Image (cartoon, rainbow, N blue to C red):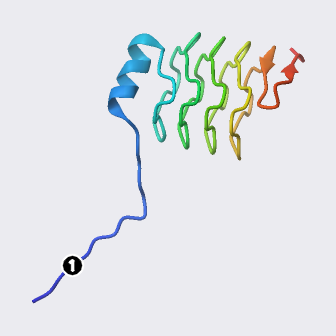
């Protein structure tokens, strides 16, 4: 008798209900949005306070006036995203990509305002 075990080293986790909610209402605080792909989406004014965006893709997204305070942004792709006037105070940030992102008047994780526009 042979017993086979399949072990996956890749785990992807996100709450599909939360994905649909953010798309419909732009209001999804404290949700698991890890690994989600929001590339190029209009998320302006969205409430993502405390959301888990670990390894999420937000490249090219409009996050103007978004509330991301306390969000987990570890390894999040924010390449070319518009984060102008967004609030990232208290966000957990490790190795996220903000290449060519617009940070005009953005409240940074340190609660300082980035004012170079």
Quarter of the figure with residue 109: top right
Q: Quadrant of the C terminus?
A: top right
Q: Nearer the viewer, residue 14 or 84?
A: 14
Question: What SS does tag 1 mark?
Answer: loop
Location of residue 9 with respect to 25 vertically, above or below: below
Q: Nearer the viewer, residue 1 or 68?
A: 68
Q: Residue at x 70, y 17 (%)?
A: 86
Quarter of the figure with residue 116: top right
Q: Position of residue 37 (x, y in %)?
A: 47, 33
Location of residue 102 with respect to 33 vertically, above or below: above
Q: Residue at x 74, y 26 (%)?
A: 89
Which residue is identified by label 1?
A: 4
Q: Position of residue 11 (x, y in %)?
A: 41, 54
Categorize mark 1 by other alpha carbons within 10 Å: few (<14), some (14-19), many (20+).
few
Q: Is residue 8 left or right of residue 80?
A: left
Q: Position of residue 106 (x, y in %)?
A: 77, 18
Q: Position of residue 108 (x, y in %)?
A: 79, 26
Count all numbered tags in the image, as a single digit. Answer: 1
Q: Give the farthest residue toward the bottom.
A: 1
Q: Quadrant of the N terminus?
A: bottom left
Q: Residue at x 54, y 31 (%)?
A: 51
Q: Residue at x 71, y 46 (%)?
A: 95
Q: Give the farthest residue toward the right.
A: 116
Q: Nearer the viewer, residue 50 or 15?
A: 50
Quarter of the figure with residue 17: top left
């Amino acid at each position: 008798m042979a017993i086979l075990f399949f072990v996956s080293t890749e785990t992807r986790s996100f709450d599909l209900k939360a994905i649909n909610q953010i798309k419909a209402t732009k209001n999804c605080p404290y949700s698991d949005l890890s690994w989600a792909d929001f590339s190029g989406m209009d998320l302006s004014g969205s409430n993502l306070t405390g959301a888990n965006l670990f390894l999420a893709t937000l490249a090219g997204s409009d996050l103007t006036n978004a509330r991301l305070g306390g969000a987990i942004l570890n390894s999040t792709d924010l390449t070319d995203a518009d984060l102008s006037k967004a609030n990232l105070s208290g966000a957990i940030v490790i190795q996220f990509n903000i290449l060519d992102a617009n940070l005009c008047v953005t409240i940074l994780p340190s609660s300082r305002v980035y004012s170079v526009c």
